[in-house]
């Protein structure tokens, strides 16, 4: 991680510009809205657009853009998974609603590889999230496995509302995803200490659900523009969009929010997954109140103070982003002036997971 935390004075800047051709380091920022630093990358890396705010120097040795390959029963060995292609798997365990499931294995894997489950937004699919993110390209650099679930529901949202999905081994979509992760652990040599979840919008909500209901499987989650665990709770159709929650009108105490998490898996006494939440202040789909409700929930679950121990802007994030840390296991990044959704910052997620 970059640790360049001071703003150089004008004279320092002048000297730097006067003496060297500035180059951004590997994984450094090299462009994006409002960025004024170097736009050429250090040798061996290329400037890649991550999103309109953030271009990043990534190692040039990355595999070509991945493609998809045909579906098949889930391979029972790691070597049987096709390489550098989005590959659909079936028969990975009980799958109540027939959630689609895809695996991505890079050309080079770490020994005992980490696994990241990446869940798409409403109207999305596994394929769309795969193509619209850098998770697969970065897997080629860092050697982790990916699972991309795909929603079986009409609006292509996730069931983050039923009591089944909100309960450990209760059924519905969260059980299918948990079972795919269990299959990977049982058959592909995945490191049980490095199983992670990430998602955007409905996929962020699913990430909270997985963190809350399957803390025995998932060790960390990144929630991009989502809600607190249980906020979408409803008895409507499985992929109900809970307007009351989304509009920021489900307000509870930290204790009440934490109780929903505890009730999801009564008797669980292990370590809960670390959480990193991201949200935009002008989100009009999932209002920013949901960011503050998540803070109440997870700080209570972790027994952290409700105010951050640090809250800073980071040199590698756009202006207006603040990174509030409440303790080692919970960070909340608020993006001023950003709507639905906060753009992906895959590199930061990987650092949070301890992969990059
Ligand atoms: C962090 O600071 C920013 C502005 O400085 C503020 O808008 C934001 O609410 C703070 N975050 C938290 C979680 O308190
Ligand atoms: C937020 O701050 C913490 C503590 O300094 C740091 O470990 C973490 O990487 C930061 N997160 C982001 C996304 O910048």
Image (spheres, rainbow, N blue to C red):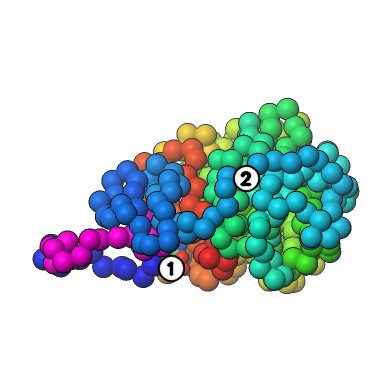
Q: Is residue 17 magenta?
A: yes
Q: Residues within 10 Å of mark 1 (few under 14, many from 20)?
A: few
What is the CA distance from the residue labelled 2 to the residue labelled 1? 27 Å
- For disc 2, does the CB lie below 8 Å from ligand 2? no
Q: Residues within 10 Å of mark 2 (few under 14, many from 20)?
A: some
Q: Position of residue 92 (x, y in %)?
A: 85, 51
Circle on res. 62: none
Give the x, y percent position of residue 175.
Answer: 80, 50
Q: Is residue 309 magenta?
A: no
- The residue tagged with tag 1: helix, strand or loop? loop
As displayed, is residue 316 above or below residue 282? Answer: below
Look at 58% across and 52% down and name the residue there: 63
Q: Is residue 105 left or right of residue 224?
A: right
Which one is in front, 162 or 138? 138
The verdict on label 1 being within 8 Å of ligand 2 is yes
Q: Which residue is mark 1?
A: 1
Q: Are marks 2 and 1 in contact (CB under 8 Å)?
A: no
Which image quarter has ligand 2?
A: bottom left
Residue named by callout 2: 66
Pick the front one: 157 or 66:
66
x, y (%) of residue 177? 76, 50
Residue 27 in percent (x, y) is at 43, 60
Q: Residue at x 44, y 38 (%)?
A: 339
């Amino acid at each position: 991680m970059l640790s360049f935390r001071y703003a150089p004075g004008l004279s320092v800047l002048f000297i730097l510009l006067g003496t060297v051709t500035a180059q951004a380091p590997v994984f450094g920022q090299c462009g994006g809205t409002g960025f004024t630093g170097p736009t050429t990358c250090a040798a061996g890396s290329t400037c890649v657009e991550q999103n309109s705010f953030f271009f990043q120097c990534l190692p040039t040795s990355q595999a070509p853009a991945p493609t998809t390959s045909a579906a098949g029963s889930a391979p029972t060995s790691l070597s049987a998974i096709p390489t550098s292609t989005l590959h659909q798997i079936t028969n990975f365990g009980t799958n109540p609603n027939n959630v689609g499931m895809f695996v991505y294995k890079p050309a080079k894997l770490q020994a005992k590889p980490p696994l990241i489950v990446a869940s798409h937004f409403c109207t999305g699919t596994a394929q769309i999230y795969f193509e619209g993110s850098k998770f697969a390209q970065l897997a080629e650099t860092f050697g982790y496995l990916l699972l991309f679930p795909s929603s079986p529901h009409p609006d292509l949202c996730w069931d983050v509302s039923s009591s089944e999905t909100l309960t450990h081994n209760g059924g519905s979509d969260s059980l299918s995803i948990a079972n795919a992760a269990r299959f990977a652990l049982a058959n592909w040599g995945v490191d049980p200490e490095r199983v992670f979840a990430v998602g955007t919008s409905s996929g962020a909500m699913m990430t909270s659900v997985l963190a809350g209901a399957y803390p025995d499987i998932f060790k960390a989650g990144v929630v991009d523009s989502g809600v607190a665990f249980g906020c979408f709770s409803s008895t409507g159709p499985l992929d109900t969009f809970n307007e009351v929650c989304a509009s920021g009108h489900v307000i509870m105490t930290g204790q009440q929010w934490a109780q929903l998490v505890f009730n999801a898996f009564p008797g669980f006494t292990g370590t809960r997954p670390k959480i990193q939440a991201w949200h935009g202040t002008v989100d009009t789909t999932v209002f920013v109140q949901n960011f503050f409700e998540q803070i109440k929930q997870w700080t209570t679950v972790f027994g952290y103070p409700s105010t951050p121990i640090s809250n800073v802007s980071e040199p590698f994030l756009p202006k207006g982003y603040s990174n509030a840390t409440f303790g080692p296991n919970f960070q909340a990044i608020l993006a001023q002036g950003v709507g639905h959704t906060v753009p992906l910052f895959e590199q930061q997620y990987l650092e949070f997971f301890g992969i990059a």
